[in-house]
Amino acid sequence: MRWTLSAITGAAALTLAGNTPPPPQPELIEVVELPLPPVAPVNAKGACTASINPHRTGCIGKVSDSFQAGDFTPDGNHVAVTVEFIGAPVAPDPASIYRDKQLILVKTDGTNFTNGDPWKCLSCGVPSEHARSVDPSKDYPHVARNARQALWGHNILDCGGIPLVSDLCSPNKTHIYPIYWPTSVNGSGTPREMRMHPDDIHMGWSSFTSGGENSYYGRLQFNPHPTNGTLRVPRYDLVDVNLLVQPNGKSPIMAHGSELTLHDQAITVGELRGFSGSGDEILYIGATREANNIDIMSVHIITGAVRRLTSHPEYADPVAFSHDDRWFVTMDTRGSDRQMWMSGMRHVPPLIDIVATTAAASTRNNGARRFFQPILIDRHGDRGEYFGQQVNYKGDGSDGSVNDPNWNGKADPAFSPDGTRIVFWQSLVVSPACGGENPLPCPVSTAQGGRTYRVMLARLSDREPTDEAPVFAAPDKIPWATPFPLGASVPTPYTLPAGNFTLNGQSSGFAKVALVKDPKLGTFKTVSVKYKNYSDDGIHFINGYESVTVTLEASDPWANHVDWYSDLLQAGAENATKITGPGGFHLSINALENIFEANGTLTTTVDAFRISLLLLLDFYSFLPRLPPPIQTKAARLLDRQNGAAWRRLIEDVPKIIQEAGIPLTGMCTPEDTITPVLVDLERGIGINGIYDDGHETFRLCKPGEWSFCKTARKPYDIVVSSDGDYDDWEPARALYASLWPGEDIEGLWPKRDDGERAETGEGDEGDNE
């Protein structure tokens, strides 16, 4: 498999978002490794000797399947971490408490606790009567904002009103309570990957059922003396539970007779990933917007408004918001090129994902070899050419460096409360993802003791501390969700029927879609699509054919075999192809193991434009001949974006066209046929009116080429803005103002004393010459 991509272009978000600011500039980030307990050479009783740890406060192993870093304490000076202690001596040695899976705090400010170590164990030595029926799930450690409690997997660790960082928080004052989800009088559910709301009261979680994965939201309620259920010890119950499904809500893809429709605002909380910094939004992985492109979404707890936070073709998953709600950091495969062979072609509707989502999501890893790195993005998400900034960019890629590709990010990253630091953790690739029969050799760990996991602290050096956003008053009952009381069952979701359908492009063309179900399982088996000049945005046009068949194993729902045939061609703002080899592409993967076997080829090729310095200088001399409002936008972009000006201009033209709402065609043809508007990085821009509303084609090529154009003041003149004087250009000024509010319109369209439009450059006399 291979893919070709020079740069990602044409990723403009065509949904007009008037309050979305320009993307932020890259910032200076320094990354350091945080200390952890020392490594014992073997996992044997007494192996953690005083020579290894003079303070007798425990040792950890080189490899751990239980290790996981969490987030900051409210003071910002400590991070919660789940570790696995090994080599402890036998009781009654005081050091015998440092064994098995435990929750520790690690200092982030370079200081030590009073025990002399930069770490402190919170759960070690807690009396058994204070930790009855502790749940074995101890992942995703999170310190509550009240500073006195911590979410530790499916447990709440509580220090009786004492801050966890305090020396007064001792084992005898600590309790560990299991979290219990009653789903019937004496039955319980099986939550996974629990996340705590910023109010420390509400929780979000996911759970697998026979129908797949669903997500839930509920309230923590302490139950000191339970009288029902299978767990009759002091516990925290999940009550007032909401199933995060909108009753009778729209699905991402729906059928209306023989037509399919797409619904971007459909609420599809597949796997819950947390909450925004204030807690007003739920973060999740949901239905795809573009084929094979797995992204992070958010939905407002009250309104149900959905936002797409990431759109890069690579895979995004673990995510955390800053407490001021201005930023988020996600673990993402962008930069690794891991997913581009299937998702590099943008703006393809997610039709094949009806059967290909598992394959698209599961190929992000190769078993123990992961491809995640932390990406910092502002709260408005990916847009245009902005795809965030890699947090650990500042390294040379060598063994053990902060951006060593063999050290891969894992869940979850987190912000300090003041927004000036980010913590994340990484694991080193190990066998069988390297070494042995694998042609890739295993790297040698540079971490202390040869450890294969590490905690990293990123300091955002350019930032000043910010205040936390007020915590959102989260309700017990989410207005758009489904109540899920005791005895409730997951309702049957909307399902598409099998058959032949048409999906019409929002701008042009259509897709003919055939949906075939498996007669035994009742699930979809094959999706076949034929595209004809399909476009949702008016600048990316898709033609060709794609068909995907999935074979599922009834005994193992996680095992997928995919047969893929693709011959897609994209023209317009991007020229791209997505093509399988003569025999197709065939993939087998288990979603739990993330190891796949493939035969054949699937190749995605995306051509992009690179502007040179010589061409840029030519563009500056050519600028006065551009027609407003394109000229003014280009001028602004040249000042701000320099070499990206032409590409950004190409991206902004569809906004102008969409806002104008005028029927348009592209280049004139001898047959006088309607053709797509030409907006292409290489071929330039071509716009005309349709039939009697047309005149001369406005033609703008890459800088250095130009043609005369008059519109005869036909309707398409509002886009081209060719003929007339200052007053005649009022519609164009209004159009520009609606697209880019806050700009100095009069400064960009100066008016002479005689009421005419002032000259903006040599040869500018009111026409486009």
Image (cartoon, grey):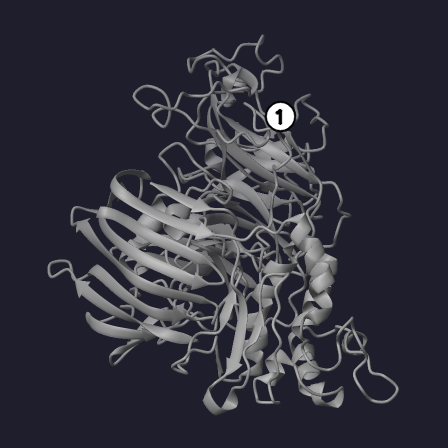
- In the picture provided, is 736 more to the left or to the right than 231? right
Q: Which residue lies furthest to the left in this view?
A: 520
Vertical arrangement, residue 392 with respect to residue 189, above or below: above
Image quadrant containing the N terminus: top left
Q: Which of 359 and 584 is in front in this view?
A: 584
Q: Nearer the viewer, residue 543 or 344?
A: 543
Residue drawn at (76%, 86%), measured in percent from left and top? 726
| Residue type, numbered disc 1 | Pro
Q: Which of 362 and 144 is in front in this view?
A: 362
Residue drawn at (29%, 68%), measured in percent from left and top? 493
Image position, residue 412 (x, y; %):
52, 43
Image position, residue 665 (x, y; %):
47, 79
Q: Nearer the viewer, residue 704 or 694?
A: 704
Vertical arrangement, residue 497 with respect to residue 400, above or below: below
Q: Which residue lies furthest to the bottom in this view?
A: 692
Image position, residue 390 (x, y; %):
59, 42
Residue linked to disc 1: 35
- In the picture provided, is 214 more to the left or to the right than 662? left
Image quadrant containing the C terminus: bottom right
- In the picture provided, is 320 more to the left or to the right than 582? right
Residue drawn at (62%, 12%), measured in percent from left and top? 54
